Image (tube, rainbow, N blue to C red):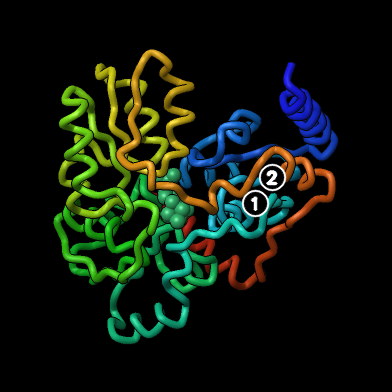
């Protein structure tokens, strides 16, 4: 056996031992590196992870994803210790709107309802009415009375997609995911020419021209579900490249092609086995949210969870 494999085995057995001692579970997003997904108790999309965080009776949640996801887990499980193995794991889109900018927008549209994509900070959620994820943005928008104006923040591409699906006008913020914006319409065209039988599955954070070429537009877990249920044997995947690990693992008989190898979310790749072990050893880094902000942010998340 190779030395690095032996080292990994030791780290894995230490993590599993400590997990029991600390009464901890490990939650991981679908974009995490393979070794992190493989040791997690649950791997999923933002919606699935928040539901797991709300339902678990573990005392500690080691959250392998990015900041806003760990914050959501803490809001839903305030009495639990939520740990982030690496505090630098932020989401570039979440920082594209501040509560101050949102409040300025609200002043211009005083009667509007604010729908925030879960990819925003807890402070921004606290100023919003409804939260949504990529799995339920259309449903959340549709649930709001037709005569209400809607401010959709921060993702203009998800907002555009939800507006088209719900057939209503939304006021959008200029935010976007830099990782998904690297997937170009030309990439999809080229891949389709190369693999004409492949089904094209893309995430709604992609640009409208990429979305227009897709067979289905789905959250990350929606993509996993579709890949398992579909009759197709080949798939072009328009989202972050980390998705391929789970897709290949769950469907070894199928072929998966990443639409663009540039779609790499660096923040999602900061977690690894060593950091999970240190996190459990030293109980670092706990997510703390001021109670008033957590309470106000929770309203928007609870409204979403009632709809789904
Ligand atoms: P999902 O909720 O679909 O997993 O998306 C989260 C995300 O950050 C995609 O970039
Ligand atoms: Fe944020 Fe984009 Fe990374 Fe998702 S892929 S966490 S939206 S920067």
Of mark 1 and mark 2, the one earlier in the sequence is 2
- The residue to which callout 1 is attached is 77
Name the residue located 42 percent from the left edge and 70 percent from the top edge. Answer: 96
Of the 4 image quadrants, the one containing the N terminus is top right
Q: Secondary structure at mark 1?
A: loop
**Label at residue 171:** none
Residue furthest front in the image:
2
Position of 286 with respect to 161 (left or right) is: right
Q: CA distance from mark 1 to mark 2?
A: 9 Å
Quadrant field for ligand 2:
bottom left
Q: Residue 296: where, in percent of width, then height?
A: 54, 69
Q: Residue 39: where, in percent of width, then height?
A: 65, 30
Disc 1 and disc 2 in contact, CB within 8 angstroms: yes
Res 219 quadrant in image: top left
Q: Residue 230: where, in percent of width, then height?
A: 28, 21
Q: Residue 61: where, in percent of width, then height?
A: 69, 45
Name the residue located 72 percent from the left edge and 42 percent from the top edge. Answer: 276
In the image shown, does 29 or 288 lie closer to the viewer?
29
**Label at residue 61:** 2
Name the residue located 27 percent from the left edge and 69 percent from the top edge. Answer: 172
- For residue 308, say whether it is visible: no
Q: Secondary structure at mark 2?
A: strand
Q: Is residue 171 above or below residue 18?
A: below
Position of 152 with respect to 192 (left or right) is: right
Q: Is residue 271 above or below residue 16?
A: below
């Amino acid at each position: 056996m190779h030395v690095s494999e032996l080292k990994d085995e030791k780290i894995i057995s230490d993590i599993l031992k400590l997990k029991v001692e600390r009464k901890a579970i490990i939650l991981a997003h679908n974009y995490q590196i393979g070794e992190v997904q493989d040791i997690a108790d649950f791997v999923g999309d933002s919606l699935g992870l928040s539901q797991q965080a709300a339902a678990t009776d573990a005392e500690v949640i080691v959250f392998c994803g990015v900041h806003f996801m760990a914050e959501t887990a803490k809001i839903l499980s305030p009495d639990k210790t939520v740990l982030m193995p690496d505090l630098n794991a932020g989401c570039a889109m979440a920082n594209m709107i501040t509560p101050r900018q949102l409040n300025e927008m609200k002043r211009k549209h005083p009667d509007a309802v604010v729908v925030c994509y879960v990819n925003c900070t807890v402070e921004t959620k606290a100023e919003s009415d409804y939260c949504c994820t990529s799995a339920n943005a259309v449903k959340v928008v549709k649930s709001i009375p037709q005569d209400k104006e809607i401010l959709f923040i921060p993702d203009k591409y998800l907002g555009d997609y939800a507006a088209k699906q719900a057939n209503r006008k939304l006021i959008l913020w200029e935010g976007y995911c830099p990782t998904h914006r690297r997937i170009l319409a030309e990439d999809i065209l080229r891949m389709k020419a190369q693999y004409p039988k492949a089904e094209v599955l893309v995430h709604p954070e992609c640009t409208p021209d990429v979305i227009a070429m897709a067979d289905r537009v789905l959250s990350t877990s929606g993509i996993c579900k579709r890949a398992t249920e579909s009759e197709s044997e080949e798939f072009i995947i328009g989202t972050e490249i980390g998705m391929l690990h789970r897709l290949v693992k769950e469907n070894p008989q199928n072929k998966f092609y990443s639409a663009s190898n540039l779609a790499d979310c660096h923040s999602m790749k900061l977690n690894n086995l060593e950091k999970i072990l240190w996190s459990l050893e030293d109980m670092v880094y706990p997510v703390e949210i001021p109670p008033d902000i957590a309470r106000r942010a929770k309203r928007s998340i609870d409204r979403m969870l009632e709809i789904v």
